[in-house]
Image (cartoon, rainbow, N blue to C red):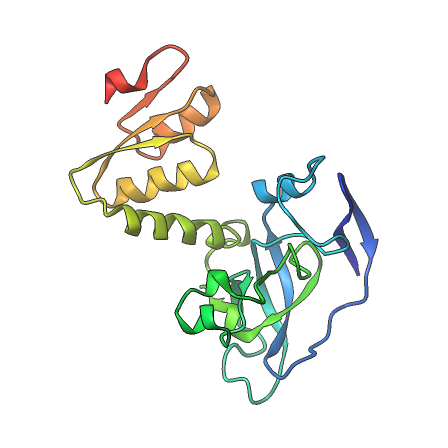
Amino acid sequence: MRAAVFAEVGRVAVEERPAPAREEPTDVVLDIEACGICGTDLQILGVPPGHPATVGVVLGHEFVGVVAEAAEDVGSPRPGDRVVVAPNVSCGRCPWCRRGLSNHCESFATYGITRDGGLAPRVRVRASACHPIAAHVPAHLAALAEPLSTVVHGAQVAGVFPGETVCVIGAGPVGLMFTALLTLGGASVVVVEPAPRRAGLAAELGAVRVVDPVREEPRSIL
């Protein structure tokens, strides 16, 4: 199969790779429907790299697919199930994991960064990393479940309540998701963004005001 590979520092290449097969009883193999290209991927390919990754790894950590293979004793997901994947992998056994801090896992890994990811027709992942997603969600939107999850978590940590005013600085993909989510939650969202196209998208997604920091001082507005 053809896969987008982190070939060397500063270079991505399309290479022929063997199709993955299950190696552990808890593995499943997915047929990829769509995979996003994240800012992290661009950082990986920077010179020098702005984010560490394993040379030779298949890139892509934001993906959706359909289960093609699963062991009979894996209850979920089953072949034919459509899933999105949580890309961070932890052992569940080290002291950090036992304390509930799996992001500090001593064996921490990430699909698309240190393990083969979704920029290929097929990928092998843990069954426990898979989360079902409805068939009616378009693949290009389903692939955004991973970055959306970080936005949902950020909104929960921020503790924004309906009727409050929130400032979102930057209307890139994550900033736009924050704008849409917080607006749906009843907040008034002010976005700071100089790029006209992104500013327009922020307004479409519900921002009550978009401030161009080149022309206005955001602190005077807020």
Q: Is residue 202 visible?
A: yes
As rendered, which of 67 and 90 lies closer to the eye?
90
Residue 213, horizontal then vertical, whole percent: 38, 16
Compared to 126, does 162 lie above or below?
above
- Left or right: 159 in relation to 171: left
Q: Quadrant of the C terminus?
A: top left
Residue 72, horizontal then vertical, whole percent: 59, 88
Residue 81, horizontal then vertical, whole percent: 53, 72
Q: Is residue 135 visible?
A: no
Compared to 29, does 213 lie above or below?
above
Residue beneath the point at 49% across and 74% down: 92
Q: Quadrant of the N terminus?
A: bottom right
Q: Residue furthest front?
A: 95
Q: Residue furthest right?
A: 16
Residue beneath the point at 55% across and 79% down: 78
| Residue 211: quadrant of the picture | top left
Residue beneath the point at 56% across and 63% down: 108
Residue beneath the point at 68% across and 54% down: 119
| Residue 160: quadrant of the picture | top left
Compared to 32, does 124 lie above or below?
below
Residue 68, horizontal then vertical, whole percent: 64, 74
- Left or right: 125 in relation to 167: right
Q: Residue furthest top?
A: 215
